[in-house]
Image: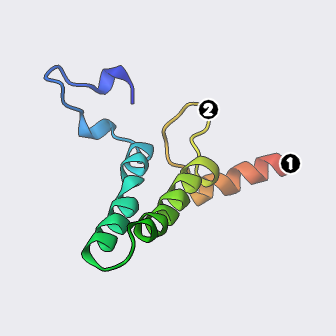
Amino acid sequence: MSAKSVRRNGGIDPATVSWYDLLLAALPLPLVAGVAWSLLTSAPTALGVGLGSLPSAAVLCYGLFYDAPAGGTARRSTSADRRRERAIETE
């Protein structure tokens, strides 16, 4: 997020929140859910953390390797974009 997206009163302009900002915000959610599950049941906390970290790792790998931002842009690429890029590479 650029410095231009910060409002004068310190808030963030919701129109400038990118797909990758949401992806970063989603990273701890499965981990927190796993810890909450382990605390609410008789399961060991290590098991809850371990199970919660798997979806978090999957979200991280998706954002880094499958749908990574390219060229410094924060635009989500679509499957049509990827097909177009593959077509250009094969020419």
What's the amino acid at mark 1?
Answer: Glu
The residue shown at (33%, 40%) is 17
Instruction: Identify the residue shown where x is 59% and y is 47%.
Output: 64
Q: Nearer the viewer, residue 44 or 87?
A: 44
Q: Secondary structure at mark 2?
A: loop
Where does the image place residue 40, in percent across and percent down from the top left?
25, 75
Callout 1: 10 Å neighbours few (<14), some, many (20+)?
Answer: few
Q: Residue 67 at x, y = what percent?
A: 58, 51
Label 2 CA crowd tier, 10 Å (few <14, some 14–19, many 20+): few
* 15 lies above or below 52: above
Q: Is residue 29 left or right of residue 72?
A: left
The image's mark for residue 91 is 1
Q: Describe the element under mark 1 as helix, strand or loop.
A: loop
Residue lying furthest left: 9
Residue at the image point whose x is 29% and y is 79% from the top = 41
User: Is residue 74 positioned above or below 6 on the image?
Assistant: below
CA gap, disc 1 and disc 2: 21 Å
Comparing marks 1 and 2, which lies closer to the viewer?
A: 2
Q: Residue at x 56, y 41 (%)?
A: 69
Q: Against 71, is 58 above or below? A: below
Q: Quadrant of residue 30?
A: bottom left
Q: Amino acid at mark 2?
A: Gly
* Image quadrant in which the N terminus is located: top left
> In the displayed structure, would residue 17 be above or below residue 52?
above
Instruction: Give the quadrant of residue 72.
Output: top right
Question: Which residue position holds label 2?
Answer: 71
Of callouts 1 and 2, the N-terminal one: 2
Q: Position of residue 23 (x, y in %)?
A: 43, 50
The image shows residue 71 at horizontal and vertical percentages of 61, 32
Q: Is residue 85 left or right of residue 42?
A: right
